[in-house]
Amino acid sequence: MRNWTEHVRPRLSSLRLSPAREQEIVEELAQHLEDRWRELVAGGASEDDATRLALAEFREGNLLAKYMAPLRQAHTPASITVGSPAEARGAKAGAPAGHLLRDVWQDLRYATRMVRRQPTFSLTVILTLALGIGATTAMFSVVNGVVIKPLPYPESENVVTIGVSAVFGTQRTPDFPLAPRMFASYADNGRSFQEFGLFSLGEATVTGSGSPEHSNTLQVTRGILTALRVQPALGRWFSPDDHRPGAEDTVILSGGYWQRRFGGDPHVIGRVMTIDSRPRAVIGVMPASFSVRGLSADLILPLRFDPALVDPGLLPEGFCCRGIARLKPGATLTQANADVARMVDAWKRIENRAQLDDLQLGPAVRPLKDDVVGDVGRVLWVLLGSISVLLVIACANVANLLLVRAEGRGQELAVRTALGAAWGRTARALLVESLTLSLLGGLVGLGLAYGGLRVLLALAPANLPRLNEITIDAAVLGFAVAASIASGLLFGLIPLVRFARSKSPLSLADSIRGGGRSASAGKSQHRFQNALVVVQVALALVLLIGSGLMIRTFQNMRSVQPGFTDPATIQSVRVLLPAVDVPEPERVTRVQQDILDRLAAISGVTSAAFLDQVPMEPFRINAIVAAEGQDYGPKKIPPTRTIRIVSPGALQTLGTPLLVGRDFTWEELYNQRNVAMVSESFARAEWSTVEGAIGKRVLIGTSQTWQEVIAVVADVHDAGAHMPAPAMIYWPARLQDFVAGTLLPRSVNFVMRSERAGTEAFVREIRQAVVEVMPGLPVFQVRTLAEVYDQSMAPTSFSLILLAIAGGMALLLGIVGIYGVLAYAVMQRRREVGIRLALGARSGSVKRLFVYRGMMLSGVGIAIGTGVAAGITRWMSSLLFGVTPVDAVTFIAAAVVLTLAALAASYLPAHRAAAVDPVETLTG
């Protein structure tokens, strides 16, 4: 670098700056001259001409003499200039078009130098921003993957799910499945649909290659795959012939199953698999990401039925399928719903059943995405909004840091202006510096977001949809960049507003003279800093209250008695008896009892039983149930109830008490006795009392046989601890005749109570006991009831963890903000404090001076934050259980925690102020 200091230093000698400060400004101005010299050389000027022009520009813009006049108490002529400021402005107007870009590039180089020269400050700012940007970006990636992204189907906005609404009792069910006989009517007569199809879920056992394996199946009619328009990775879709009854059995594999079972063999097409003891030819392989309505399955099978032989009955099981369609171009949801309403009326006329009129069926067409995402979208938006508050707090914290540094750089900014730099030029340089810091913070934050996303996905509940689509993609990168730029502008503009107030000659003169070093900061500086601290405290309180509400919710849910006891000691395994292996319905229960006897004989098992579903699983049987003595009227269908099919001893094994009455017996199962048990809520809803239910009768579905109630069972929160316990019917695990056909529990959960539950050795013995009864029978869904219970709590746990982390980080940033402002105030008022102590002030009074300021700021922030929280926590209502959004206990507890934290943050700098040495301060 050329020796520019000999031209710069003489012009600063009269300012009487400290040697360190003078050297810093000399180096900065010399660097500016060097940058300008390089630009001129790059533009074609010789080195000598570039030197002469750079110095000329430096002198032409010199307004230093004007602003030095108040310091010298006399006007001093400006230094020798090559031209007037007006001439300089004219020269600048004729500059090349790239002048602005060169200035910005110069500002960027200057900002980079400042970052390197102040590593501690820069690192603090970058890490603070990285926390806020990283947390917000990670949460946005979840919202983007689950809610914002279109479904992975071509033109997915035209894909809809089709159901019907129905009235049971006094309640309308808005999402009811379709009856199989509706398929032909919808597929052939729909005016709004290009393609339409039905699907249902099932289970199957795959044998013939390796160990028997349980697989989830997806049965589809024609129209489903063509409506979704997802091409197979290998092979073909089902053809119309594949859906015809009596045709050759075929199967399409999911991408994951193809990799797992066949190792990704590209020659799998044409191979024959044995599924439920029936050979099926593989005709296709779907992509790994393929799912229907967010549901994935190992095997996709053609759904075959003869509509003329299928009776819908009046049970939900009669309406067993879900519909998916693709709208025709230009068709709207309103038109589609009107179309379905027309077809429902036509179908009811064809069926000609009075009971169908009583159901009051109506259309229910909605975007498929609404079905896939469900209520999760609202929860995720609430979480994103909450965590975004953390970014605002981080920006406020950084703005405070920049205010403090801007005050320390007052002389530099004043000298820049005195040497001719326009305010806009200096403001742009400062803004570029802020944006540089924010982009660096965003870069580090993106790395934190990537790691945080891995943690979020590990914490995310299994029922969170579209987990495989949550990733760092272009949209997330764009969000991170936008958040970084917005943050840089937000915290960068605040010091600029402060700097804009300091452009007058007198204020610049005072800054150049350095008088601010020994006096307290101005009122405007204090107002800015105080306002930022209040904002941090208020927002921190909002996040703390949100975290507190989730903690209260989690505690309330944990305190609910779910209807079973000691779930960690209950081992559950699922076993499916294929119809091909056990074709006789009357043998099914006997085989299941044989398995049960073997399981009960395992060492450590105190009781064992089986039931169709363990509590708190998402899938359950619902049926309309009429209670004896109740008048439902000629046009009133009885309400639907949850049906639980159980063996004798199931309630004892689960720890569900019998309030009155007795359990089923095996004799009743084998002799087809017409008995049932009901839950407490059912008994009270239908007969007002528990004791009065014994001996009453219930009628399920279209069955003509009444069942005698022999017991009333304690309520079980089957849909989750946060949901009311449903009214339930307990049915003996035997051949059922609910509708025209049978409902045989071939797939059941065996439950065993044992202290060995959850251990590998215990599970091995369970598998061996099952194989001894029926070799090759797979055991699946191996878990304890505690795992099922925890899974039902997972959405609340997920929200709790995220808000707790955000609340903790907000509290930390709030403490840092209060501490930083007071520590800076102590530094600014050090001389004043020294004078106070020299005049006899006690150290306690000095401490109180600063603690009072900290607590006043905190008090204002807490008051504002309480009002803000009272308004926005109402958006959390869907996340809460057993607590209101304005819970007084939570609000008070959060305020107390924040007050104590603020007190600690205020005391530390106050203690430092009280320790000031008056002699050293006054003589230094």
Image (spheres, rainbow, N blue to C red):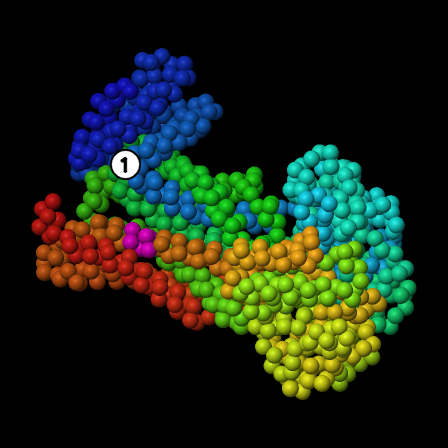
At numbered mark 1, what does the secondary structure look like: helix, strand or loop? helix
Is 92 displayed left or right of 585 in the figure? left
Q: Position of residue 878 (x, y in %)?
A: 56, 64
Q: Position of residue 327 (x, y in %)?
A: 78, 49
Quadrant, the C terminus? top left
Q: Which one is in front, 548 or 592?
A: 592
Is 756 displayed left or right of 708 in the figure? left
Q: Which one is in front, 637 or 691?
A: 691
Q: Position of residue 611 (x, y in %)?
A: 66, 67
Magenta segment, prevailing SS (helix, strand or loop): helix
Is 596 displayed left or right of 474 in the figure? right
Q: Is residue 733 above or below residue 103?
A: below
Q: Which residue is found at the position 70% from the left and 74% from the top?
A: 666
Q: Is residue 888 above or below residue 429?
A: below
From which residue to which does the magenta span run? 815-820
Q: Which one is in front, 334 or 200?
A: 200
Res 121 visible: yes
Residue identifier under label 1: 412
Res 78 visible: no
Q: Quadrant of residue 849?
A: bottom left
- Residue 719 in magenta? no
